[in-house]
Each structure stands twice: as C-alpha cells, then as structure tokens.
Image (tube, rainbow, N blue to C red):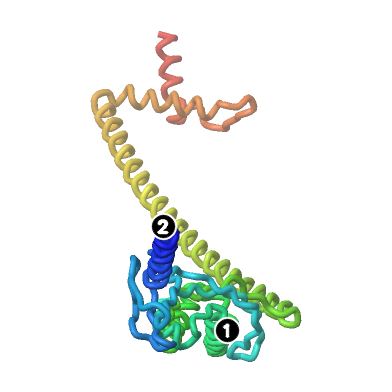
Amino acid sequence: MINNRSLIIVGGLAAVAWLASNSLYVVDETELAVKLRFGEVVQEDIQPGLHAKVPITQTVHNFDIRVRTLDTDPSRYLTQEQKAVIVDSYVMWQVINPTRFYEATAGDELMAVRLIQPRVDESLRNEFGRLDLQQIIAERRDDLMSGPTQELDELLREELGVAIHDVRVKRIDLPEDVSAAVYERMRSEREREAREWRAQGQEEAERIRANADRRRQVLLAQASERAETLRGEGDAEAAQIYSEAYGQAPEFFSFWRSLGAYRESFDGERDMLVLDPTSDFFRYLRSAEDQSEE
C-alpha cells in the first residue's frame, strides 16, 4: 500500500510537472511571441513575462526584437551614365510585427535574410542608377542612403513585418577599367578650380594694389599741399620779420645784406669779379676806408 501510494504521488508530481512545463512559458524582455493552434495564429504580440497555453494543441514562437545587422555582399551597380561602381553595404533591421514575420518566414531568420537581401540590392541598384558618378562621389553617404532606407522600411514593414532602421554604404569602389579615367577627371576639375581661385586671388590683389596706389597718391598730394601751405606761410612770416627789421634799421640791414653778398661772391679760392671800384657793390668797403683815413 505504501509503495503504491508513493508511486501515485510521484506519478502525480510528474504529471503536474509535465503539465506545468507544457502549459507555462516565458517571454524574455528582448522578445515578442505569437501563440499558435495547429499552426494558426490565435494570439499576437505577446509581451514579455510569464504566460499560459493549452498543452499539445497550442504552441508558442518567440522572436528576438533586437536590432540586427545584415552584411550584404559587394555588388556591382551602373550609374546614370552607365559607369560601374562596386558597393559594399549593410542593413540594420528589426522584427516589429511577429505575426507578419511568422506568416512570411515561418519564424526562420535565414529565410528573412534571403528575402531582405534582394530587396536591398534592388533598391540600391535603382538609387545608384538615377545618379551620375560625380553626384555619388560628392554627396554624403547619409544623404545618399536616406531614400533607399525609407523605401525599404515602408516595403518590408508590409511584406515581412520588419523595420529597416538604416542602410549604410561601407565602401564604394571603381572597377580598374574606369578608375584611371575618373581620377584624371577629378584631377582636371581640381586644377580648373585651382586656376579659378588663383585668378580670383590675382584680381583681388590687383584691386587692393590699385586702391593702395590711389590712396598713396592722395596722401602725397595732401602732404604736398600742406607743405606748400606751410612753406608759403613761413615765407610770408619771414618776409614780414625782414620787413619789420628793415624798417627799424634800414642802414644796418643794407650793410648786413652787403656782407652776405661779399661772402657768397668770394666763397671760392679762384672767385674773381671785374667791377668798377666806385660801384655801389663796394660802397661799405669804401666807407670803411674813408673812416680809417679820417
């Protein structure tokens, strides 16, 4: 009896444990889940926590809702002018609708990748096909990928229940057959820009130099005018002083001027004048002789 009772208890506990393990399930914080009955979705977007289900008839699929990265293979695209570029890119995607994701992929992440990659390839092919090579090189990569990101996000939300957060270009290469031509074109354009900048600099330098020369001429003219004015004022003041001095002692002033004339006339060793001794030039010398005789 005791052994039978123990067996019954153990069997009951085992049944309870089996029932609990098949009736209760946990959805992690990084997951969302859907509940199925014979493969048909009966409950969508089950939030994280502990939940119950009917054993055997109901099953649960958990889906990781963290952002994942799909590193695509490098692909060759043609630009608007039919020049080839090799683009290496990656996609950041996330499951946001578990029901749609399950219906489209049966919960298989590899299937999701196989469905996402050709959509990305097609979108990038269209984007690069509408741009020429110069635009691809000149534009920032964030701006270049904004259109494909938005387009893919709208498409795959509807088709797969996933959100495309970002499409990024890691690298854009040119095939060897067009690299040399592109580099030569870029070098020519840079040289043209350099010539334009040098021409503008030369023009600006000439303008500054002309302005400086004009300003110099104006300053010199103003200085010359001021100097002439000051010189005229000085000469007028000197003439006035001479006139006043002459008026106070005319005879002495005449004598002083005669001495200056004597100094200037006999300044050199070989200076010689042929004059009449009785001329006015020797008037003060004669006066000195007359005074000495007296």
Percent coordinates x, y for residue 176 in the rendering: 75, 79
> Dot 1: what SS?
helix
Height in image: 270 above or below 114? above
> Quadrant of the rendered structure where residue 124 is?
bottom right
Kindly identify which numbered label has been placed on residue 101. Answer: none
Q: Amino acid at mark 1?
A: Arg
Say few, some or many: other residues with alpha carbon within 10 Å of mark 1 (under 14 / 14 to 19 / 20 or more).
few
Looking at this view, is 90 or 81 the one in front? 90
> Quadrant of the rendered structure where residue 184 is?
bottom right
Looking at this view, is 206 or 235 the one in front? 206
Q: Is residue 28 in sight in this rendering? A: no
Which residue corresponds to mark 2? 2
Q: Is residue 190 left or right of residue 241?
A: right
Height in image: 216 above or below 142? above
Looking at this view, is 156 or 177 the one in front? 156
Measured in 3D between alpha carbons, the distance from the residue under mark 2 to the one under mark 1, in whole angstroms, is 61 Å
Farthest residue toward the right? 177
Q: Are marks 2 and 1 in contact (CB under 8 Å)?
A: no
Looking at this view, is 267 or 3 the one in front? 3
Tell me the residue at 36%/78% (across/down).
Answer: 54
Tell me the residue at 57%/87% (across/down).
Answer: 118
Height in image: 246 above or below 134? above
Which residue corresponds to mark 1? 114
Say few, some or many: other residues with alpha carbon within 10 Å of mark 2 (under 14 / 14 to 19 / 20 or more).
few
Tell me the residue at 44%/77% (across/down).
Answer: 61
Height in image: 169 above or below 228? below
Give the mark nearest the N terminus, 2 or 1.
Answer: 2
> Quadrant of the rendered structure where residue 202 is?
bottom right
Q: Is residue 182 in sight in this rendering? A: yes
